[in-house]
Image (cartoon, rainbow, N blue to C red):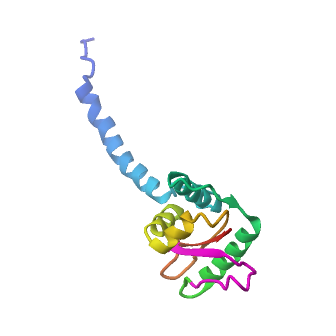
Amino acid sequence: MPDQPSPTPDAVAPTARARSARLIPLLLVGAMLLPTTACTPEHMIDLINAERTAAGVGQLTPDASLAASCQSWAEHLAALSPPQLIHQNLRALGLGTAGENLALNVDVDAAHNALMNSPGHRSNILSRSYTKVGVGIANIQGGAWDGYIIVCELFQG
């Protein structure tokens, strides 16, 4: 039986390379479809408190009552057609000194960045007057804003 030369790496590599070339785009598409961060009120509060720490301002304490108001309001706004950012009547909620931020965006990180780039919203996030925070997040389903979220933040001293 004649000796057959063993395959060289160059002879085997094109097949492996071809398989890799087909697999990489699938992985990239899959990665684009997965959310990269948690879309939770807790994640937003972590982002807020990181900004406050960086600014030398004390961290905010999560407040369940504020969070419940935020969640209810975010769900109400997300259900409107089209979704709208309408501020709550904070006095009617019994909140004296309080601030509210609203955002409509693709995820929590994008919403937080947009709020931090707006002077009025940034002021609420970094205000020394506030010691408590509540966050609510609602998903928009259907229509032109399908897949977006509405974030409601309430701050109180």
**Left or right: residue 128 compared with residue 25:** right
Q: Which residue is drawn at 35% across and 41% down?
A: 20
* Viewer-side residue, 77 vs 11: 77
Q: Position of residue 152 (x, y in %)?
A: 61, 73
Q: Position of residue 43 (x, y in %)?
A: 60, 57
**Left or right: residue 26 compared with residue 1:** right
Above or below, 47 against 99 in this view is: above
Above or below, 137 against 142 in this view is: above
* Viewer-side residue, 99 vs 111: 99
Q: Where is residue 153 in the image (x, y as percent from the top left)?
A: 61, 70
Task: Give residue 66's quadrant in the image.
Answer: bottom right
Which region is colored magenta?
86-104
- The quadrant of the image that shows the N terminus is top left
**Left or right: residue 120 compared with residue 8:** right
* Viewer-side residue, 54 vs 128: 128
**Left or right: residue 18 compared with residue 136:** left
- Magenta segment main secondary structure: loop
Task: Give residue 102's quadrant in the image.
Answer: bottom right
* Viewer-side residue, 10 vs 137: 137
Q: Residue at x 64, y 66 (%)?
A: 130
Residue that extends furthest to the front in the rendered view of this protein: 129
Q: Position of residue 98 (x, y in %)?
A: 65, 75
- The quadrant of the image that shows the C terminus is bottom right
Above or below, 49 against 141 in this view is: above
Q: Which residue is drawn at 52% across and 75% down?
A: 104
| Count of marks overlaid on the render | 0
Q: Is 89 in the magenta?
A: yes
